[in-house]
């Protein structure tokens, strides 16, 4: 049994934390909203009032947070992890983060004798529920091997990707591919609609023609059920913007990711931020003058 701290038990963090508890570990939990942890406390978790309190009771801490600003605040804030940590604490950040931010946070953590690893996850809320996430870890390999059994409570594909930031970079590239490919489908659908071709009939052909390997999401897109989603458009916009930022920091052109980022942000700013990532179809149709 390992003393595990878990910070951030929202939509995806909650089932991950539940699976760590079910894996037989003692878990101390914290979130901005205490009610989010109610089911976890019923499973045996102990509530802590702050990230610092979590750290003081744990040998390893997992964080699942919206993005770089939140991770920074939880680690370095006045009541953050480092404020309560003893030397030897290990932190795995399950969030989607920037490699450059990861490296900076790891440096600050090391000053306190804390080891920080980037450990983002993929396969969504259902993957978190089923403990079938892919976990991509960058950083100290000895810490990875020591606590790999904890990570295997949340995912059945746990990878050590190399140095600090490589887990974060892998996740960003993964999400760039998956999210940007959806925007190609959106654009193709709107072109078909605007030019008078029934998108459903187009899909009937695309699914058996040379595009067949790339249109798997099109039936879901054509269902137009954008309100029921486990991955909000605002999260997709954030993830693709991270890809653009990584490219900018490296001095690498990213025309496709940049175009997808503009598309996602346009839809987000039109009030579709809490809809499915496929809700970019709505703003694309509006721009094209297509009514549905």
Image (cartoon, grey):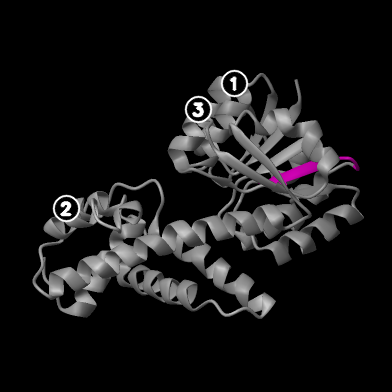
The reply to whether the C-beta atoms of the residues labelled 1 and 2 are less than 8 Å apart is: no
Position of 259 relative to 89 (above/below): below
- Please report the residue visible at 70 percent of the width from the left and 59 percent of the height from the top: 72
Give the secondary structure at mark 3: helix
- Please report the residue visible at 77 percent of the width from the left and 55 percent of the height from the top: 164
Can you see residue 101?
yes
Foreground mark, 1 or 3? Answer: 1
Quadrant of res 149:
top right
Q: Which residues are drawn in magenta?
A: 87-93
Chain-order first, disc 1 or disc 2: 1
Q: Which residue is mark 1?
A: 22
Chain-order first, disc 1 or disc 3: 1
In the rendered image, residue 88 lying in the magenta stretch gets the answer yes
Give the secondary structure at mark 2: helix
Residue 124 relative to residue 49: left or right: left
Q: Which residue is mark 2?
A: 204
Residue 108 in percent (x, y) is at: 84, 59
Residue 206 in percent (x, y) is at: 23, 57
Other residues around mark 1 within 10 Å, as few (<14) / some (14–19) / many (≥20): few
Chain-order first, disc 2 or disc 3: 3
Total marks shown come to 3
């Amino acid at each position: 049994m390992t003393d595990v701290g878990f910070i951030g038990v929202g939509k995806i963090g909650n089932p991950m934390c539940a699976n760590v508890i079910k894996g037989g570990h003692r878990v101390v939990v914290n979130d901005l909203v205490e009610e989010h942890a109610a089911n976890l406390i019923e499973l045996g978790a102990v509530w802590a009032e702050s990230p610092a309190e979590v750290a003081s009771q744990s040998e390893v801490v997992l964080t699942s947070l919206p993005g770089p600003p939140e991770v920074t605040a939880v680690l370095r804030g006045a009541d953050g992890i480092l404020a309560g940590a003893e030397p030897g604490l290990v932190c795995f950040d399950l969030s989607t983060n920037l490699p450059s931010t990861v490296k900076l946070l790891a440096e600050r953590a090391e000053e306190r004798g804390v080891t920080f690893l980037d450990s983002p996850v993929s396969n969504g809320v259902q993957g978190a529920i089923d403990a079938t996430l892919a976990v991509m870890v960058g950083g100290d390999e000895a810490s990875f091997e020591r606590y790999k059994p904890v990570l295997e409570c949340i995912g059945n594909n746990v990878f050590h990707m190399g140095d600090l930031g490589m887990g974060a970079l892998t996740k960003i590239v993964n999400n760039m591919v998956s999210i940007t490919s959806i925007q190609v489908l959106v654009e193709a659908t709107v072109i078909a609609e605007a030019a008078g071709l029934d998108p459903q009939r187009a899909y009937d052909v695309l699914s058996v023609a040379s595009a067949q390997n790339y249109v798997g999401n099109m039936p879901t897109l054509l269902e137009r059920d954008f309100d029921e989603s486990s991955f909000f458009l605002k999260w997709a916009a954030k993830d693709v913007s991270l890809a653009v930022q990584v490219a900018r920091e490296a001095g690498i052109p990213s025309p496709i990711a940049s175009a997808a980022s503009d598309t996602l942000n346009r839809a987000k700013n039109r009030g579709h931020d809490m809809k499915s990532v496929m809700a970019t179809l709505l703003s694309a149709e509006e721009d094209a003058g297509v009514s549905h």
